[in-house]
Amino acid sequence: MNRLLPAALLSGLILLIDFYAFRGVKTATHSLAPHWRYLLHGLYWTTSALTLAAVLSYNLIPAQALGRGGRALLMGWIFAHLFSRLLLLLFVLADDLRRLVVWVAGLFSAKSAGSAGNPISRSEFLSKSGLIAAALPYVAVTRGFLKSAHDYQVLKRTVYLPHLPASFDGIRIAQISDIHAGSFWDRDAVIRGIGLLNAQKPDMVFFTGDLVNNSAEEMQPYTEVFMKIEAPLGVYSVLGNHDYGDYSSWPSPQAKVDNLQQLKDTHKAMSWELLLNENRIIERNGESIAVIGIENWSAMARFPKYGKLDQALAGSEKAAVKLLLSHDPTHWRAQVLGHRPEIDLMFAGHTHGMQFGFEIGKFRWSPAQWIYKEWADLYQEASQYLYVNRGFGYLALPGRIGILPEITLLELRRGEAPATT
């Protein structure tokens, strides 16, 4: 019954949008021969019926029966349908506003009232444009589902730190984030992604949180896969907001506690050093750097604040360079930048780049930038840096459109950054 209500509400919303957007379909097809017009109308309402069936199936059929691939397919179809209809809706609304302006102008001008031919042709143009635009989400989501979801990209960046010990000059750090194992539907693709990470031959690997969506059990099919990550100086990890089980209903408070412990045990089973408000000192030739990890801490009220930065830093005072792993990038401005100048570089994730947008050279756009000041790639203010990983996995939308899954390879160099021209 708990899942029936959201399914009913979403189905009702879809029907309202579909009925209103259908006005654009009727306008765009009114000049076609009857058999073509009926065919297109039938296709329109068939996609609506399939979407309603997808909503009901996703909410009412047990997850185990659908399987991860089945749930991903249903969610992808629902997203594509809503995005498609909303695009068409924009064109219909634009035409309605245009009609309103023409009607108001006609009240005050006989000339405007007599020009009845133009509104229809303009309506047809807008409606046909809307139909073309509405087809694009199905193409984009299909590609995002079939290819882009696992089209891992290796992004290489260099950060210059004047006080980096000579023994660590050139150290290579790989970062992955936001695995969200409960969303995976192609195990072989994930295996290829880990192979690509290992091919970079990093000295250390950082994982910056959200191993699962909700339950520690989601990692069971993938523990052996991520166990194969290789780095001579170790793999270090922290928790993200999804890892605590805060977004699930548990049969008892103890069940939630047990789930978190199982998740921590999974990190250990993979030979990852999970840093829970603590640090590790890495030494070479009598020189040292600190890897610091805190539990999730967000400047946004809707996300948890479990992190204790003072506690995490304790004992790292003598390390020449301090590297912080913190899941949420809003933590950088709230507690690190200008507050903790001894932290040279922070690694974060969390945003996924919204899994939607585009990147052309240095220009990038995503709705994520409306929420997060720092949402992807490398940022610098004064002598402090932040790197925000776009995520290895995906959540909700079972794929990516424009913002690809990422493996970061960040090299630390001793000295000043070369001047750019």
Image (cartoon, rainbow, N blue to C red):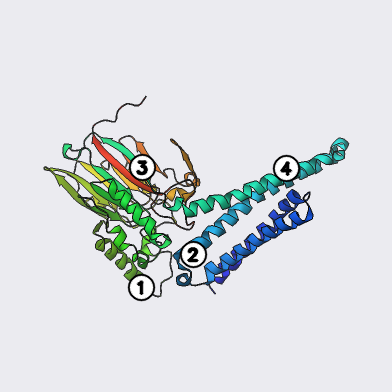
The image shows residue 287 at horizontal and vertical percentages of 14, 42
Q: Of the residues under marks 4 and 1, which one precedes in the sequence?
A: 4
User: How many C-alpha atoms fall within 10 Å of the one at disc 2: few (<14), some, or many (≥20)?
Assistant: many
Amino acid on which disc 4 is placed: Phe
Residue position marked by numbered label 3 in the rendering: 155
Amino acid on which disc 2 is placed: Arg
User: How many C-alpha atoms fall within 10 Å of the one at disc 3: few (<14), some, or many (≥20)?
Assistant: some
Query: Alpha carbon of mark 4 to alpha carbon of mark 1: how far?
Result: 58 Å
Which mark is drawn over residue 365? none
Which mark is drawn over residue 125? 4
Residue position marked by numbered label 1 in the rendering: 255
- Choose top left, top right, bottom left or bottom right for residue 124: top right
Q: Nearer the viewer, mark 4 or mark 1?
A: 4
Q: Nearer the viewer, residue 104 or 165?
A: 165
The image shows residue 155 at horizontal and vertical percentages of 36, 42
Q: Of the residues under marks 3 and 1, which one precedes in the sequence?
A: 3
Residue at far top of view: 421
Residue position marked by numbered label 2 in the rendering: 71
Amino acid on which disc 3 is placed: Leu
Query: Alpha carbon of mark 2 to alpha carbon of mark 3: how far?
Result: 30 Å
User: How many C-alpha atoms fall within 10 Å of the one at disc 1: few (<14), some, or many (≥20)?
Assistant: few
Can I make out residue 398 in this image? yes
The image shows residue 316 at horizontal and vertical percentages of 20, 48
Q: Residue at x 23, y 46 (%)?
A: 203
Query: Alpha carbon of mark 3 to alpha carbon of mark 4: how far?
Result: 43 Å
Q: Which quadrant is home to the N terminus?
A: bottom right
What is the tally of numbered marks visible in this picture? 4
Query: Alpha carbon of mark 2 to alpha carbon of mark 1: how far?
Result: 25 Å
Q: Of the residues under marks 3 and 4, which one precedes in the sequence?
A: 4
